[in-house]
Image (cartoon, rainbow, N blue to C red):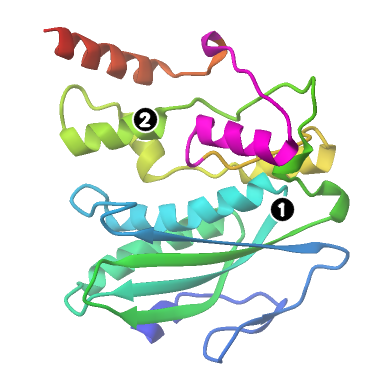
Amino acid sequence: LVARVTARLAMPAWVVVGPGDDAAVIKPERGALDVLTTDAQVEGIHFDRRFVPPDAIGHRALAVNLSDLAAMGATPRAVLLSLVLSDTLDVAIVDGMMDGLLALAAAHNVMVIGGNISRSPGPMMVDVTAVGAVRPRRLLTRAGARPGDGVCVTGTIGDASVGLQSLRTARGPAPHTCQERYLRPQPRVRAGMLLGRNRAASACMDMSDGLADAVRKVAEASHVGIALDAGLLPIGDEVRRWHDGQSRNVID
């Protein structure tokens, strides 16, 4: 299985040692800081294989890490991939996961340079460690917010939550865009890089856990208070229709 996975990986010149040794070795980007993040996707907690296809599992596992790098203003470079799998798992599922992960990696010029495969009688787990690079003056953190700053998001909110609800319950018209936002979220890599490069943001944070969580953590890190106008929240039409439909069902 290790050979099957590593056979699909290509190594650029800045990877000195790739898969097959005890550790990977890469050349740092000149004049840049290394930015590292890790995140695990656990079956039954972060995804349900009854309605999440294998390619979406792989896509999501990488996307959450790329989103963290984007929030730091970093350019993603490389990832390490660890899989925890049961003996009975069909190899086609692993192939599908790699399809989704490698497609997203290719879209952002990210290289999978190593990892690990372990056996477990428990749930499947896909763990990714991502490495990015950022110039010191372009680094974004949660701690830069100041009184008078505005609060912005890069897209609409609530889509993935509605997508998950619709996939779980299969009630009412399925909001296709919302389901895609849950199954295959698109990390804001280019937006993060531009915000850091142009110094257009004083603080930044990945919003995978929701707007309320992000606002609270930025406020804590920056030692400020943050007030939001609910009427200005960017909520898409599919999300509004879904919640209107659920409200009518409750009243009925």
Instruction: Answer above or below: position of 206 versus 59.
Output: above
**Mark 2 vs mark 1: in front:** 1
Say which quarter of the image contains residue 240. top left
Mark 2 → mark 1, Cα distance in angstroms: 28 Å
What numbered label is drawn on residue 177? 2
Q: Can residue 7 be spotted in the picture?
A: no
In-image side of 10 versus 14 (left or right): left
Amino acid type, residue under disc 2 in the picture: Thr
Name the residue rendered at 39%, 35% in the picture.
160
Considering only vertical position in the picture, is 176 above or below 232?
Answer: below
Per the image, the residue denoted by label 1 is 74
Q: Dot 2 surroundings within 10 Å: few (below 14), some, or many (20 or more)?
A: some
Q: Quadrant of the N terminus?
A: bottom left
Residue depicted at x 29% and y 67%:
124
Q: Which residue lies at the image location 52% right of the left edge and 13% below the top edge?
A: 230
User: Which span of residues is magenta-colored?
Assistant: 208-231
**In this rendering, position of residue 25 left or right of residue 47:** right
Q: Is residue 131 left or right of residue 249?
A: right
Residue 95, compared with residue 233, is above or below; it is below
Q: In the rendered structure, which disc, 2 or 1, sits on the residue that comes first in sequence?
A: 1
Percent position (x, y) of residue 37? 60, 61
At mark 1, the secondary structure is loop
**Do the residues bearing badges 2 and 1 touch, measured as CB atoms within 8 Å?**
no
Q: Is residue 134 visible?
A: yes
